[in-house]
Amino acid sequence: MSVEFSFLLVQALSGLASASSLFIIASGLTLVFGVTRIVNFAHGSFYMLGAYVAVTIVPWLLQIERSPTLFFIGVLISACVVGVLGVLMEILLLRRIYKVPELFQLLATFGVVLMVQDAVLHIWGPMDIAGPRAPGLRHGVMILDQRFPAYELFLICAGPVVLGLLWLLMHKTRFGILLRAATRDRDMVGALGVNQALLFTGTLFLGAFLAGLGGALQIPRVSASAQMDLSIITEAFVVTVIGGMGSIGGAFLAALLIGQLQAFGVLIFPKITLVLVFLLMALVLVVKPWGLLGRPEAAPASAMPEGIASPRRFRVFEKLLVALALLAAAMLPLFGDAYAVKVATEVLIFAIAAFSLNFLVGNGGIVSFGHAAYFGLGAYASGLLVTKLGMPMEPALIAAPLAGGFFAALFGFFIVRLQGIYLAMLTLAFAQIAYAVCFQWVEVTGGDNGIVGVWPSTWAASRIAYHYLVLAVAVLGIFALRHVIYAPFGASLRAARDSAPRAEAIGIDVRGHRWLGFTIAGAAAGLAGGLYAFSKGSIDPTLLGIPLSVDFLAMILLGGMQSVMGPVLGAAAFHSIKDVFMPLTDHWRFLLGASIIALVLIFPRGLGGAYASLRARFAGGAQ
Amino acid sequence: MTLLIVENLNKNFGGVVAARDVSFSLAAGEMLAMIGPNGAGKSTSFNMVGGQLRPDSGRVMLEGQDITGLPPRAISRLGVGRSFQVAQTFLSMSVLENLQMALIAYAQRTRDMLARADALFRDEALELLDQLGMADAAARPMNTLAYGDVKRVELAIALAGKPRLLLMDEPTAGMAPGERAALMRLVAGIARRAAIGVLFTEHDMDAVFAHADRILVLVRGEIIAAGTPEEVRANPEVQRVYLGTSGLRAALRARAAAHG
C-alpha cells in the first residue's frame, strides 16, 4: 500500500514539474495574446531557441566554474537573448499585422516558425544537442521510498515563483498596470495617450523571454532538437485556451490540470495521453467557451468580412479561361512527360482540398487550421480498406469522402459552437488528435511509416489513366461545391458570417448551417485525400499534419480567399512553385515562411484579387 | 386576441437587476414605445421578447402561444421581426441580396443547394425595397450605404418575414432629425395598414410622442408608468425621473419667471 502511495506521489510530483514548465511557456503566450490579440505561433520557436542558446552558452559558462550560479546566469542570458529576438519580431513583423484578420496573423507567425526551423538547422545542425546537468541539482531526493530528481523539485518551485513575479509585475509596476489595462481594452489605452508601440514591444520582450526561459530550463531534462517548437506550441495553445486566452491565472490552473492528466493518464492509457489532453480541451470549451478564467471577446463591430462577397457569375472571358485550363489539363498527357503528369494530378487533388477549405474560410468565415485532418482521414480510409480488407479502388474511393465527412461532422459538432480564434484553436486540436491516433496506433495505421501498397484498380493503374480519373472527379467536385456557394445554402453561410444575430433573427439556424458546411467541406477534403492515397500508393501521418494544413491555407491565401475560383489557381501556383524550388534549395521551409509573410504583408488578396483589379482597370480603360 | 402578452419578466446580471416584474401587452396594429434612461433595461426586456436573452422567470405569450426562452430563429419563424440597436445587415452583399436572403430564410430554403440564390425572390425583394423607398439602391453594396439607409434596409429585412410583431430597438439611433421623422411615419403607416404590432424603444421623445399609441416608462428594470402619451406626459413620477427633482424645480422656477 505504501509503495503504491509513494509511487502515486512521485507521479503527481512529476506532473507538477511538467505543469510548471508548461506554465512558464504558456504564460508568455497568453500575455502576448492578451495585449496584442495575436496568437503567436512562433512562441514555440522562441522556446526552441531558448533551449538551443542555452545548450550553447551554459556549457561555456560552466567551463569557467561549475557553479549553480553560473548555470542559472546562463539560463537567464539565454532567455534575454530570446526576448531580444521577440522585440525584433514585434518591430519587423507584428507591428504591421495588428489590424489584419486573425487568419493572416496566424499564417504570418507560422511563417516565422518555418523560417526559424531552417535557421536552427543551419546554425546548430540536424543532430539533437544534449545540455549539461545543473550543478548542485544533479542528485536525487528520496521521497518515501522513491528517488526523485532534485532538478524536478526545483522546477516545481519555478512555476509558482514565475507566477508570483508576474503578479508583482502586473500589479506593482506602471508597465504591468498598462499591460492589464491593454488586455481589457486596447483601444482605450491607446486613446489615453499611452505609447502603444513601446507597450507592445515590451510585451513581446516579456513573452519571448518567458518562452526562452522555459526552453533554457529544459536543457537538463531534454536535448535541444529541431522538432521542439511544434510539439510545445500545441501544448501551450491547449493550456492557454483551457485557461482562457489572456488569463495568466487561468494558464496556471490549466497547466496544473494538464500536468496531472498527463502524469496519471500515462498509467491508464499510455498511448493516448495526447488525445486525453485534447479531449479535456474540447470538453472545457463546450462547457465554458472562453476557457476557465477567460473573458468573452467583445463581439467585433460590424465590419466588412474578409472573404467571398456576392459571387459573380462567369462572364464569357472567364468561361473561356476555364475552358482553356480544362483543355490544358486534358491535353497534358499528350505533351508532358510522366513527371509533368504526376505534378498535374497532384495539383488537381490539392485544388479540391483548397477549394473545400475556402468554402469554409472564404465563404463561411470558419477559419480551420486543421483541414488536413479530413484530407488525411480520407486517405487512411481508402488506404486501410484497400490494404487491410482487400477492397478494390472504386468502393475505397467512395469511402474517402464518407470518412472525411463523418469525422468533420463529429469534430465539427464541437467546433461550430465556438468563434474566431477559439474556433481556429479547436480545429487545430482535433487535427492533432487525429494525427496522434494515426501516429500512435501502429498495429492498424503502421504508425510513422504509414501504409504502402495503396494502388488503383488495373484500369486506372497507369499515370495517364489515373490523371484522367482525377481530372474528372476534380472538375465534378469543384463545380458541385462552387454551385453550392452560389446556392441559397452558400449564401446563408455568408449571411451567418456577416452577422450571426441578423441571420438568427430571420430564422436561420446558424450553428446547424455551419455544422453542415463543415461536414461538406470535410467530405470534399476526404475525397481529395482518397485520390491522393492512390496517386502516391502510400499514406503516412504527415497527411494529417499541421504543415499540410498550412500548405492548404497558403494555397487559398495565394489564390485569394475572397475569390471563388482563386483557391484552384492558388493550388496550381503553390504546388508548382514548391515542386520547382524544393529540390533546388536546402532552405525550402525558410523560403516558404518568408513567402507566406510576404503574401500577408504585400499581397493579401492573392492572385484572385490581382485578377479582379486587373479586370477592373481593363474595364475602366475600355470605357 | 391580444398579440403579445408579457408577464412578470425578471432578469439579473450578477447582482444588477436589469428587469423586475416587467409586464405589458400589445395589440395587433398598436405602436407601443418603451422609454427610459440609459441602463433602464429597455434592451434587456426587448431581447427577452426576441429570444436573444432567456428570462430568469416570467412568460412571453405570442397570440396565446408560450414563446419564453425559444431561440431567436424559432421566434422569428412564429412571425416576430426585429431590428437591432446597432443595425445588423449582411455587409458583403448588395441591398437586393440582403432582402433576397431574408426571403429565402422566410421560405425556409436556406439549406437549398441546387437553386441559384441570386435568381430567387427578386420581385418580392424589389417590392419590399420600393415600400421603403430604397428601390433605387437595390444594386448597391450594403457597405456603401449611409447609416440611415442601412436602418431602412434592416427594417425591410424584418418586414420580409411578414411579421405579426415587429421589435425595433432604437430604430432612429444615428439618424438625422429629418430622417427620423420620415422613418417613424413610414413604420407607423406600414404597421397600421398591415395590422402589425410594433414594440419600439427610442430616445427621441418627438418620435415617441408623435407615433406611439401607448408608452411604457422603464427605470432600473421596473415599469414605473404606462399609458397614452398624454397620461405619461402628465405623470409627475415620469417628470421627476426624466428631469430629476432639482431639474424639475429649476424648470418650474424658469417657467414661473417666464410667466411672471
Image (cartoon, coloured by chain):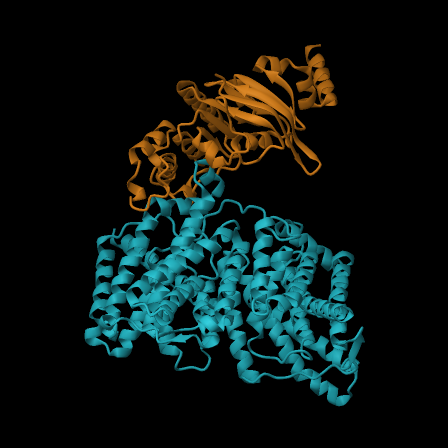
Chain colours: A cyan, B orange
Residue at the extreme bottom of the image, as rendered:
A63
Residue B206, given in percent of the width and then of the height, sits at 55, 21
Residue A522 visible in this rendered orientation of the protein = no
| Residue drawn at (47%, 54%) of the image | A410
* Residue A67 figure quarter: bottom right
Residue A501, given in percent of the width and then of the height, sits at 49, 40
Please indicate whether residue A546 sits to the left or right of residue B100 in the image: right
Please indicate whether residue B119 sits to the left or right of residue A540 in the image: left
Residue A440 visible in this rendered orientation of the protein = yes
Location of the C terminus of chain B (image quadrant): top right
Q: How many marks?
A: 0
| Residue drawn at (57%, 35%) of the image | B53
Residue A118, given in percent of the width and then of the height, sits at 51, 78
Residue at the extreme front of the image, as rendered:
A1
Please indicate whether residue A242 sits to the left or right of residue A5 in the image: left
Judge by depth and name the residue closer to the eye, A560 or B9: B9
Residue B37, given in percent of the width and then of the height, sits at 64, 28
Give above or below for B186 relative to A426. Answer: above
Give above or below for A284 relative to A121. Answer: above
| Residue drawn at (47%, 45%) of the image | A511
